Amino acid sequence: MKWIDIKAGFKDFWNEFKNVKFGLFGLILLFIFILAVFLNPYIVPFPEASSRWRDITYWEDNPVSAPPVWVNWFSSTKRAPSLIIREHTFSEEKMRKMKLTRTIFEYEYSYDLPPLDVIFHGYAKGSPVIMLNIERPDGRIVELVRRPISKSDGKIVRISIAKDTRIESYNFGAKYESPEQNRIIREMVKPTSILFSEAKEGILVHPTPLKGAYKIIAEIILPSETDVVEDVYLSLSGSVSGWLGTDNSKRDIWSGVVAGVKWALLIGLLTAFTAVSIGVIYGVMSAYLGGWRDSLMQRIFELFVGIPLLPVLIVMSAIFKPSIWILIIMMSCFFWVGPVKTVRSMGLQIKEETYIEAARALGSSSSRIIFKHMVPLLIPYSFASMALYVPSAIVYEASISLLGLGDSTIVTWGQILHDALTGGAVINGLWWWVIPPGLFIALMGMTFAFIGFAMDKILHPKLRTR
Amino acid sequence: MYWKYCIKRIIYGLAIFIVLIFIYSALFNTTMESTLRSQIEEEIHAETMRLDTRMTPEELTRYINERREFKQHLYHLDKPIWKRIVWRALNVLSLNFGKATIIRSSAGESDVWTIIAECLPRTVLLFTTAIFINIILGLWLGIKKAQKAGELLDKTTSIGTMIVYGMPSWWLGMLVIMFFAYTIRIFPSGGLHSIPPPTGLAYYTDLFYHMTLPVLTLVIIGFWGSAFLIRNIVLSILQEDYIMAARTRGIPERKVLYGHAMRTAAPPIVTMALLSLLASVGGNIIFEGIFSWPGLGNLYWISIEQNDIPVLMGNLFVTTALYIGGLVILDLIYGFLDPRIKVGGKQ
Amino acid sequence: MADTNDILKVENLKINFFTRKGKVYAVDDVSFSLKKGETLGLVGESGCGKTTTVLGLMKMIPPPGKITGGRILIKGEDIIPLSEDEMREKIRWEKISMVFQGAMNCLTPVYTIGKQMMETVQEHKEMEYLQAKKRIINYLNLVGLPEDIIRRYPHELSGGMKQRVVIATALFLEPEIVICDEPTTALDVVVQAQIINLIKRLKKKLGLSVIFITHDLATEAEVADRLLVMYAGKLVEIGTNEQIYGKRGPIHPYTEKLLKATPRLHEKVEELSFIPGTPPDLVDPPSGCRFHPRCLEVMEKCKKDIPSLIEVEPGHWIACWRNTND
């Protein structure tokens, strides 16, 4: 096949293809998916989701099983979303050798339900002392915590208001609560719901949100010149979080789902390509060689066909615990049977053509005839097949992962669904955990279905023209 | 002619099954044996508990070793590996699957074959019902689409086919359960029947009540595909010369369509239906699991979770047998329906 | 040409195909008549409109085609206004039937021959099973096939046998007009001869009026009395075999080329004669006479005006400017 022929072939094909509307739509979707893979770090709040999926420290600041932020649009009770505040105003005072710095974070609270936690982050060198206060819109200032940092060359500081300020918040609230209600057990108190509520009776049991501008003030004492606290930021853990909410391990689902795109594409395309390539070559060879070789190849083929794919795949995965690459190879080893029957009958037809006979008479070798004359005719069919196999491959991998047998070092949509299932998402109605991964599987399936069916339509025009 | 074809297909099927059993036995030999060994140890342990306790430690050890050797000999574990594989394969072929480690049948038995035989009909019931409905709906829509090919109905329903093409049935099942069983509580979330199961006619209505959600899910995903395939089959037949010839002869359209066309379409359509059924047998492990439908697929999943290797292997063997058997039956039916195979070639 | 002996009269028949690429003028203003007992040959290149014309006679034009003008009179009655039901019940197969080309694929593969024939008979005539069966066997014998063909499936028969079945099926309702659409094209030479002889015998015996389509002039000469020549959807010549093959009188340049292209066994063949160029695209046919781009005797007038059929001798019509000038 000369390059010019291939180019001309593609051009003809493209001319036909662009007339099929849903095919174009499929291509656009595919393009969006591919774009998502490349733009992955920029469109998700947790770019390292893929490699740090099981690292609980990465997800620490997120709420557990929180719905997505846009739930607020549909609800009259507005919940505070998760947020990271990096901007701050900074001032320092020097007192002889010590420095006193003030870092102020501003937070506009206009919701009905407060954030679940407010966490101060910093990187400390030396032995500074960090004090956190919060200044409310009603002017009251609550001293939250005083934390000395033990001496070190550098360590991460993380102060969580929800965990570390129970006593202080309780004391604050108790001042305004009626005596009867004061009998609430301190341990049951949620600091943020006290701090962000109006200072009046009921603050501990039925809080009314206090909306307005809040300031979270970090006063840091740096005893010596080498002491410093840098990289400070505030992260708020909301009751709604992220584009697709969080799961019960606090992971941002949107980040996980987007991280899964590349794996789905990889699994699907690689498996489909390998399997169809093997299948087409096998079918053509079987057709061309004919005779006892054809019969033998057909018997082997029937052997593979008799294997029920999913059960065997499951057992093999359970025993051999494969990585994703081995899984792809395993799937290819079974998927290849798909195109063989059709390709073989097409091959048998082509074999009867006189130009094949002519080629043989001219002394062409078998492999030359197969690869130069027969296979190129099958390329359009091969591509249509490949497109239609991608969704199957993705679903099989998802099934294996759903059973917990998949490669746990990577994030695939199947893995997320496995966690959803074992995490009780269905029973607890955590729809944002269950719907998106499967939806993406379906969407990617739909994309390749559009493309594959469009190609198939071109190959088999159903309306005869005279 | 046809008989020759039948016998050929059956022999091939059997041959393939036997070869596969041997392959499975070889591949999974180690796993199965380690289970067997631990089962043996358990048996010996149970035996020693029932013994007369006046034996000395040496006598006890000797006894254990004797029993172990005996049992290992019984289960051929002392033979070279290929003999073990052969023996295991032969066992399987005679339906002797051994005993389950953890799973029990509803009557409490641990014989693997009993457990499997109990689950099998449930799977068949569920999927045959779903496929049956799929085909009926698929025929109705597919024929309509073929008659008005290229028009609006055809195009829009084809889009529907493509939308559900890559949708995992078990995921849709999860959604359906979340909606119909938890949000609006009108259907049960799974299981075969209520506990305790009602008797008489109510038993059957209860069964159907529990089947509704799974069947609904299967039909939503499946019927688009059948309609599309049937449409393609019927359409390509409608464009054949003999259909035009029949019309030219003055045969009314109804007879042309439902007689000539559909009769010719019968072999491929039946093939399609049976293949879907077979695919369900092999592929709906997770689906049954989601709906807690105690069929073969669910058993598979449970046996993986519980690490009950005998049941797992037994299940695998039975599934493969069903699968290959189904393929053979498919060929036989196809040959029966298509006179070109049934009656054979030229004179 | 008005003749009460005309069993079929076609007047200015126009059939167009409305395709995505444009309107195809497949049959453009074709007029001819068929007398009772006569065999009319219809010749022309592939794609010239022969099959479309005869499909039009049965109103079986496949979409996107439609009859857009003219009249088709069978025994004086115009069938174009008839509804589909009327066509199916009264006209098709009862008044006019067809022997298809390439008998390969016009028999339903899943029904026995007997079932298909019985179905056709019972659809048209109120006949008892045994009576119908008798008629079927009768006609099968007439075409030289044994009775047990009834139990066979189409794939069990050879090409020649299938062709005979198709002929028997076309005849057993005893229609007035039988169209044979290249019935021998797909068969090997020996079988071809057998079928042609069969058709000739049956024609005589049953007094059939036949339209016989072929692209092979030799076959046409054997079977037919008169000849219609079509080119690019138009009739270019009508005449008796004598008049056209006789090499005496005037002739259309296309017909002349066709004759030249048929090699004779008894003549010395220096080189194979052929017609240069290719048949025209019927979406955008050439202006004037459609043959003018390939005609060796083309004149200026040919490129502008469409020639109509002129009677150059009694019963011999030619559509050519050169011939009317002579």
Image: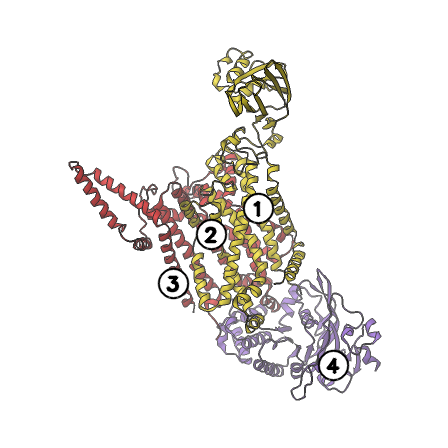
Q: Position of residue C129 (x, y in %)?
A: 51, 71
Same subunit, tags 1 and 2:
no
Q: Nearer the viewer, mark 1 or mark 2?
A: 1
Q: Which residue is mark 1?
A: A444
Query: Who's the residue at 50% across and 78% down the image?
Result: C146
Q: Is residue A455 above or below residue A110?
A: below
Q: Which residue is mark 2?
A: B279
Q: Amino acid at mark 1?
A: Met
Label 1 residue SS: helix
Q: Colour of chain C?
A: purple
Q: Amino acid at mark 2?
A: Ala
Q: Which residue is mark 3?
A: B11
Q: CA distance from mark 2 to mark 4?
A: 65 Å
Q: CA distance from mark 1 to mark 2?
A: 22 Å
- Output the chain of dot 2: B
Placement of the C terminus of chain A among the 4 image quadrants: bottom right
Q: CA distance from mark 3 to mark 4?
A: 65 Å
Left or right of A305? Residue C290 is right
Same subunit, tags 3 and 1:
no
Q: Position of residue C180 (x, y in %)?
A: 63, 76
Q: Nearer the viewer, residue A23 or A147?
A: A147
Label 4 residue SS: helix
Q: Amino acid at mark 3?
A: Ile
Question: Residue C27: which quarter of the image?
Answer: bottom right
Q: Colour of chain B?
A: red
How busy is the neighbourhood of tag 3: few (under 14 within 10 Å), some, or many (20 plus)? few
The numbered dot on residue C256 is 4
How busy is the neighbourhood of tag 2: few (under 14 within 10 Å), some, or many (20 plus)? some
